[in-house]
Image: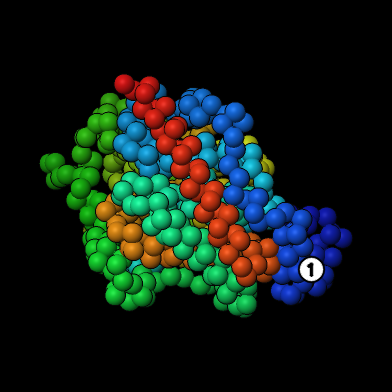
Amino acid sequence: MTEAPLPKAAPEVLAFFNSPRPSRQERRALGEQVRRDRPLEALAEVPAADRRSDPLALLASQEESRLSSLITLRHERMTTDAFAFLRGAALIMVDDLHRTPQSGINVQLCGDAHVANFGMFASPERDLVFDLNDFDETNPGPFEWDVKRLAASLVVAGQANDHKDKQIRKATLTGVQAYRKTMAKLSQMKTLDVWFATVDFSDLLSAVKDTALGKAAKKAGEKASRRSGDSAVAKLTEVVDGKRRFLADPPLLVPVPADDRDRVNKDMAEIYAQYLATLPPDRIALLTRFSFVDIAHKVVGVGSVGTRAIVLLMQSGDGEPLILQIKEAQQSVLEPYTAASQFHDAGKRVVVGQRVMQATGDPFLGWCKAGELDFYVRQLRDMKGSIETVGLSPEALQVYARICGSVLARAHARSGNSSLIAGYLGDEETFDQAVTDFAMRYSSLNLSDFEALKATLA
C-alpha cells in the first residue's frame, strides 16, 4: 500500500489538484482494516533456516562492485563482534525480511536503521540536533522493516554488553513501544507541525540528565561539538612548504599521487560542477568562495567499506579550509525487494531520501556522477557524533531505545501517513510484543551468520 504516484498527464494533474484528501479519521480507519487483513502477530515471524539465502553469498554479491583491495578490511571490521556484523549485513536482513509477513504500508525507509545510525549533527543554524544520520540504503518500503532493524540492533547491542535476556527484551520492547506511541501522537498533530518537528540535542540532554543515559549523552554531545570541520582539518591534513594537504595513512587515507594530479584535477572540476548544479543558489554562492586544494581516498564505515569515498580539501581566499566528502552511492539493498528507485541516479536517491526523512540536514548535501558511478556529497564531520552503545547499562540502553524509537517514528511520519500507520498499530501492545519477539529470534540468525563469516577468516 503506497501513496498514489504524482500525476503527469494534464487531466490527472487537474484531478490531483482538486481532489479532497482523506481525513485523519478516514486514514486511521483504513489502517485498522489493514490490521484485520494482516494481523500484527504475524510480524513476529523469522524465516526458517532452509528458506534463507546464503548470507555469505549475499555479502559476496555486494563485493563484486567494490574495491577488491578493501574487501579484507571490510570483513575484518564486520567480524569485530556480532553487532559490527549486523551493521554491515543490511542486505542479509532485508533478504530475510522480504520472506516474512508484511504490513504493505510503505514509507520512505532509512533502510539501515540500526541503533548506531542515530546521532547528532549540526543544523544549518549551528544547533546540535539528534536524528537518523545514514541514508545510503534509503528507498520506499514497508515501515516495519526499519522498526525491525532498530529492534534487532537493540537486542544485539544488549547482548554485546552481556545484559540478561530479560533486560534486553525490556529495552527492545521500550524502543518499539516508543515508536508506536509517538506515531499515535504524530497522527493527531497538524501536518506542517509534523513536517518541521526536530529533536534539539539540548532538549534531549535535559530530558535524560537524571536518567542512566544522562552521562553518556552529555559525553557524546561534548565530543560531537568538538568534531567540527576544523577538527577534521587538524586530523586529516598537514601544512608542507606553506601549503595544506592531506596526510598519507594508507589504506584509510590515501592522497592522489602527484603524477596523477593534473588528470584528477581536470576530472574533478567537471564532477564538482555537476554537484554545484544540484544545490540551491545560496549554497552555490557560499561555495564559490572556496577553491580546490587537494584530494584523497578515504575509507569510511563498516558496511560501506569497499565503496569509493573521496575527500576534497577546499580553501577560501583567506586560507579557511573546508572538507567535503564525495561518497559512492550504489543500488539500495532495498530495491531488489521493494521497487527500483524512481531516481536513475543513486546519489540523488540518497539525497532526496535524506531530505524527506530529516527535518534539518547538511547544507552542502548534493549529488554528482563520475563516469558510470554515482556519488553524493556532504560536509565531513561538522559536529557529527553518536551515543556509543558499548558499555551502556541495561537502564541506559532502555532510555536510548525509547529515544531512537521516537525519532524513527517522526522520520517515517514525514513521508508516510501517520494516521494510517497509527490505525494499523492500534492502542494495544501487540505490535510491540511481535516485533520484540522477532528481534530476539533474529539475533540468533545474526550470530550464526557472524560466526560463518568469522570462520572464513580463520
Q: State the residue position of label 1.
A: 17
Q: Front-most of 288 and 452?
A: 452
Q: How far from the left and from the top, in percent, is residue 193?
A: 56, 76
Q: Front-most of 401 and 349?
A: 401
Q: The disc labelled 1 sits on which kind of residue? A: Phe
Element type at mark 1: helix
Quarter of the image that includes the C terminus: top left
- The quadrant in which residue 207 appears is bottom left
Placement of 172 over or under 18, stated as above or below: above
Tell me, yes or no, if residue 111 can be seen here: yes
Q: Please give the name of the residue rendered at 15% of the width and 45% of the height, measured from the top-left corner.
A: 239
Q: How far from the left and from the top, in percent, is residue 415?
A: 61, 61
Q: Please give the name of the residue rendered at 50% of the width and 44% of the height, measured from the top-left corner.
A: 441
Q: Front-most of 153 and 439?
A: 439
Placement of 70 over or under 116, stated as above or below: above
Q: Please give the name of the residue rendered at 52% of the width and 36% of the height, measured from the top-left corner.
A: 92
Placement of 148 over or under 14, stated as above or below: above
Q: Please give the name of the residue rendered at 62% of the width and 51% of the height, measured from the top-left corner.
A: 43
